[in-house]
Amino acid sequence: MTATERVRGFTGVYDADEHREMAKRLMKPTAARYPGFTRQLTDDQVLDIRQRYATGTVTQAQLALEHGVSQSTIGDLVNGITYRDVRGAS
């Protein structure tokens, strides 16, 4: 299929509901959406990781090794992609 054929087939209609549903399917699993899903880290561990990473004295890879998770798990955590519901005392 050529680029021109793909453009011709485009209806130009944006379906926000369909887009939202697709985004939900692509999102990582969370305890809220999947009752049987268990988290890899406790809330206290999450807060400790965020605090330590914010100081700049430890890398994501070091934190991952300490907690037995992948570096991408730590990266998602510190970038607010996962564990969004865990917040420290302000």
Image: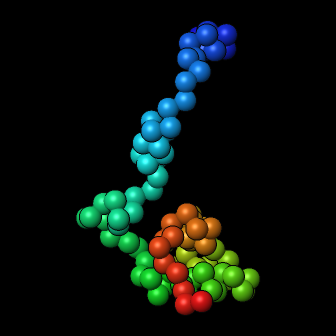
Task: Residue at the far bottom: name it.
Answer: 89
Instruction: Using the image, determine if residue 53 lies above or below residue 38.
Output: below
Q: Is 56 on the left or on the right of 63, as rendered?
A: right
Colouring scheme applied when the structure was drawn: rainbow
Q: Is 32 on the left or on the right of 86, as rendered?
A: left
Q: Residue at x 47, y 87 (%)?
A: 44
Q: Residue at x 41, y 46 (%)?
A: 25
Instruction: Using the image, determine if residue 39 lies above or below residue 56.
Output: above
Between 86 and 55, which is closer to the camera in this rendering?
86
The x and y percentages for residue 64 are: 55, 75
Task: Residue at the far left: name it.
Answer: 36
Between 7 and 28, which is closer to the camera in this rendering?
7
Between 31 and 17, which is closer to the camera in this rendering?
17
Between 83 and 56, which is closer to the camera in this rendering?
83
Q: Residue at x 48, y 85 (%)?
A: 45
Instruction: Using the image, determine if residue 9 lies above or below residue 81.
Output: above
The x and y percentages for residue 48 are: 55, 87
Can residue 71 be spotted in the picture? no
Q: Is 67 on the left or on the right of 55, as rendered?
A: left
Determine which quarter of the picture holds residue 22: top left
Can residue 46 be spotted in the picture? yes
